[in-house]
Amino acid sequence: MESTPLKGPDEASSVVGDVDLSQTKVLIVDDNLQNLELIQAYMESLPCIILSAQDGAEAIAAVEREQPDLVLLDVMMPRMSGFDVCKHVKSSPHTKDTVIVMVTALHEVGDMERAVECGCDDFVSKPVNKVELLTRVQGLLRLRVLKRRMTEFLAQRRNASKGTGDSHG
């Protein structure tokens, strides 16, 4: 597995809107090395930390160890499909909020329904369109960071109100 922080041409490029993406982590999972390298190359323009895995078991281990914000997950892999990986990640209380984007050549409605049932958050079709991929990943990372901020803020408010004896919350 590879872990490489990728930065844009200047420091301001790590901020999208008012959200700094420079510390976000994206795990790319694909058993086909050419597909993995292509998506990594596309992702280089985003200011995030890129991780990679080449099969489902490696992906699950990386998710548990690295706690990525987003996983770009190939569906068709030997031994453990992307559906199985997604189901495993979404069923764990420690990783259930990880955003999962299925990267798939499957175009059947049944396959899409199965992905949604497993907890998939979005889809990108193969062959991957660079602009579509980057736009979706950037938007989903922004939402992930904002959700984390909101959760932290609400936790601080709860803790502050407990300290003052305020029962109005």
Image (cartoon, helix red, strand yellow):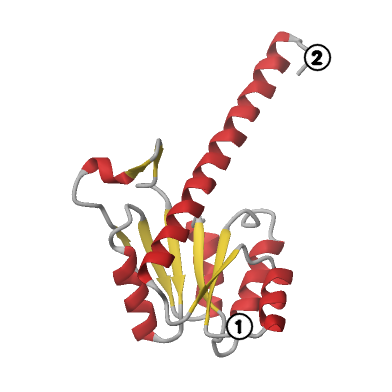
Residue found at the far right of this picture: 167
Answer above or below: position of 37 versus 9: below
Badge 2 or badge 1: first in the primary sequence: 1
Q: Position of residue 149 (x, y in %)?
A: 54, 35
Query: As drawn, is 14 to the left or to the right of 79?
Result: left
In terms of image quadrants, where is residue 35?
bottom left
Circle 2 SS class? loop
Q: Position of residue 33 (x, y in %)?
A: 36, 84
Q: Residue at x 28, y 59 (%)?
A: 45
**Tag 2: amino acid:** Ser
Answer above or below: position of 102 versus 63: below
Tell me whether circle 2 and circle 1 mark residues in contact (CB < 8 Å).
Answer: no
Q: Position of residue 49 (x, y in %)?
A: 36, 56
The image quadrant where one finds the C terminus is: top right
Q: Would you name the residue on which mark 1 appears?
A: 81
Query: What is the crowding at mark 1: few (fewer than 14 residues within 10 Å), some, or many (at least 20)?
Result: some
Circle 1 SS class? loop
Query: As drawn, is 20 to the left or to the right of 160?
Result: left
Q: Residue at x 61, y 62 (%)?
A: 121
- Distance from the alpha carbon under mark 2 to that under mark 1: 48 Å
Q: Would you name the residue on which mark 2 appears?
A: 167
Residue found at the far bottom of this picture: 78
